[in-house]
Image: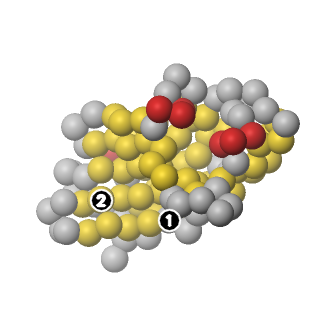
Amino acid sequence: QVQLVESGGGLVQAGGSLRLSCAASRSISRTNNMGWYRQAPGKERELVAITTSGGSTIYADSVKGRFTISRDNARNTVYLQMNSLKPEDTAVYYCHLNIPAWGSNYWGQGTQVTVSS
């Protein structure tokens, strides 16, 4: 079993920045996809960004140019640098890990990001 431990959420004013981190509790397969999703009140969970072990990245259109996803494979950690935050970015952000070879998906407990106007 793999646990994902998130950190870095909080309250920030519009235009500010936050950095989220997510660390896996144990070594994981070299081939994996790590990413971030978010869920705002009354809305469905949506993709924010994904990074593959091969270095590819995918971003939601709403965060392109403002958010940057990165990873440290040696530490089994993924980061989300969020700049120019907007009130509409307010949500619970969830870390996600997909390991195709194991047929497994894991979720973090979620971290709250609140952007005030």
Give me the residue at 54% from left, 48% from top.
21
In the rendered image, residue 82, in percent from the top left (x then y), is placed at 61, 34
Give me the residue at 36% from left, 36% from top.
58
Depicted 111 relative to depicted 2: above or below: above
Q: Residue furthest top?
A: 65
Q: Residue furthest bottom?
A: 1
* Quarter placement of the N terminus: bottom left
In the rendered image, residue 71, in percent from the top left (x then y), is placed at 40, 40
- SS class, disc 1: loop
Q: Nearer the viewer, residue 31 or 113?
A: 113
Would residue 78 be visible to someone looking at this image? no
- SS class, disc 2: strand
**Amino acid type indicated by mark 2:** Asn
Would residue 38 be visible to someone looking at this image? yes
What is the basis of the colouring in this image? secondary structure
**Structural crowding at the residue carrying mark 1, measured as other residues with C-alpha within 10 Å and reported as few (<14), some (14–19) or many (≥20):** some
Depicted 3 relative to depicted 116: above or below: below
- How many angstroms separate mark 2 from mark 1 (CA)? 12 Å
Residue 109: name its quadrant.
bottom right
Return the residue at label 2.
98
In the rendered image, residue 100, in percent from the top left (x then y), is placed at 19, 60
Left or right of residue 46: residue 19: right
Left or right of residue 100: residue 113: right
Instruction: Tell me the tag on residue 108.
Output: 1
